[in-house]
Amino acid sequence: MERLSVRRFFLPGLAVGIASWLSAYILYPQLRVFELGLPSLRRVLALPVNQEALWNSLILSLATVLGALPLGAMLAWAVGVYRIPGRGWVQIVALWPLALPPLIGVVALYLLLEGGWMALHLPGMLAVWLVHVYALHPYGYLFTRARLEQVDGAWWEAAALLGVRGVRRFVRLTLPVFWPAWRRAALLIFLVSMSSFTAPLLFAFDERVLTTQIYYYKLNGDLPSASALSVVLVLVGLILFGLLEGTVSPMKSASKGSPRPLRRSLSRTGRLLGGLFAGGYGLFVCAPLLLLFGFSFQENPLQWLSSGLSRWTIRHYTDILSRSEALQPLWSSFQMALLATGAVLLTGVVVAYLARRLSGGRLLLALCLLPYALPGTVVGIQLLAAFSRPHPFTLSQVLVGTFWILPLAYFVRTLPLGVQAAASGWEAVQDRLLEAARTLGARRGYLWRRLVLPLLGPALLGGGWLVFVQAATEFVASILLYTYANRPVSVEIFSYLRLFDFGGAAAYSVLLVVGLGGVSLFFRRPGRWMSGWG
């Protein structure tokens, strides 16, 4: 009887413990920011510079949606409907901006746009907009492609037979059918654009957006003003996140049987133009990465861009590899990312399991997804406000200024990825399989080693890889929280850029990509690692 009583209260007790843990490091820092920021909110928003920052953020995010969403939708239409030549190549490179670590992508575009070879030297906000369109248009592509797989091409054939063409067909058929997917993509693009920090900091340092304004207030030691602007970003993020989660699912095909794919044939001229489009798009995506690699081997990168006259060298690599202290940031980032990844996956597995077994577990799941609506600058300010003094949650220790503040920030920022990965993994663990194993006499430990972990493994390793990459390359919260002793690789690359050592920044970026590639070998073949768990 006592054993049954322990089992009965184990899961609720575990849920209470996890809820307390998440409240301490997710909810409490938010409440602390509101406590500091709300009294100063009216004063801060009354300043013209902050009003300018707010409007710049909103206008930039709206412009990003208007640029990234049509580009992604047209790309999906060209690949999925018109089947242009080179579509296989386009489908591969279309996802590169999402797979590329954010800092590396921005650095590559910074070197491309600021170098003399292109002679663009775009105005700050226009350059930021171009970077955002480059980085975020895959969201429009993915949502449109997913909807194309569901629609029935017979609808468009029927519209053509009825004489509905051109703008009228777009307004009466295409827009209603694709609107749910495009609305969800637009909200996601707007949310990510509002959270952007690295691109405005590098390209528009003389103009203001909310994220950089928070950073400048923090540098000046004005934490109440930084908290007040953080409150604004939190409210905007939560509203967008609520709209995103409340978006209705796209309607499904009403025809019987499998839907007929939507296809359109191309003339010879159309195929030629489609091939040119595929080649131009591939160059658009790959050029920054190729340039980053080339920069790392140039004695004078800017001279190489402007005139092509520069000596090839490996000096930037030897300067980094020959000094142990130069590699310390890379090791620190990987070490902190590993700690954050382990904590995220463990929390994700437990929370997803509780959401599956307890009626109130969905609240834990929602709490874990909450940081998705918070920009990195807000997470940094929240942790500064909450843990710059002793607190029971930290065993009466001050976390700010210590090694542990950055792994905690990475944990908070990447927790939604880990929880979603664990939740998808638990979907593969069906209750009937567990019941069958128990019926055959499998004990709890054997059941986990031979059934549960192998089924969870692929999702956890895939999600773990994403968490590790995001944590190892995190820059936004890191620049607010780091100390020189635990400075991460992202801050080190930024310091190279501030010294105009573009070759060193490029070489360090290449080393980071190579290091991430080496770590990915662990995540490539889940079955190889799962096979030893029994």
Image: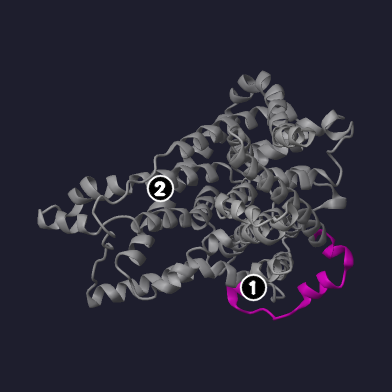
The residue positioned 38% from the left and 62% from the top of the image is 75
**317 within the magenta span:** yes
Across and down, in percent, residue 185 comes to 44, 47
> Is 241 part of what is drawn in magenta?
no
| 134 relative position to 520: left or right | left
Residue 53 vs residue 323: left or right?
left
The answer to whether residue 425 shows anywhere in this view is: yes
Question: Where is residue 377 drawn, in percent x and y?
Answer: 67, 40
Quadrant into which the N terminus falls: top right
Residue 203 seen in the current view: no
What segment is highlighted magenta in the picture? 304-329
Please identify the quarter of the rendering in which residue 49 is found: top right
> Which of the image's four quarters has the C terminus?
bottom right
Please give the name of the residue rendered at 61% of the width and 63% of the height, measured from the top-left corner: 108
Q: Which mark is residue 172?
A: none
Q: Quadrant of residue 39?
A: top right
Task: From the top left corner, tell me how far across and down residue 515 is, in percent.
Answer: 73, 68
Q: Secondary structure at mark 1?
A: helix
- Sort mark 2 into few (<14), some (14-19) or many (20+) by Cα contacts within 10 Å: some
Residue 72 located left or right of residue 298: left
The numbered mark, 1 or 2, whose residue comes first in the sequence reads: 2
Numbered label attached to residue 293? 1
Judging by the rendered image, the residue that carries numbered circle 2 is 66
- Distance between the Cα atoms at labels 1 and 2? 31 Å
What residue is at 88 percent from the left and 69 percent from the top? 323
Q: Secondary structure at mark 2?
A: helix
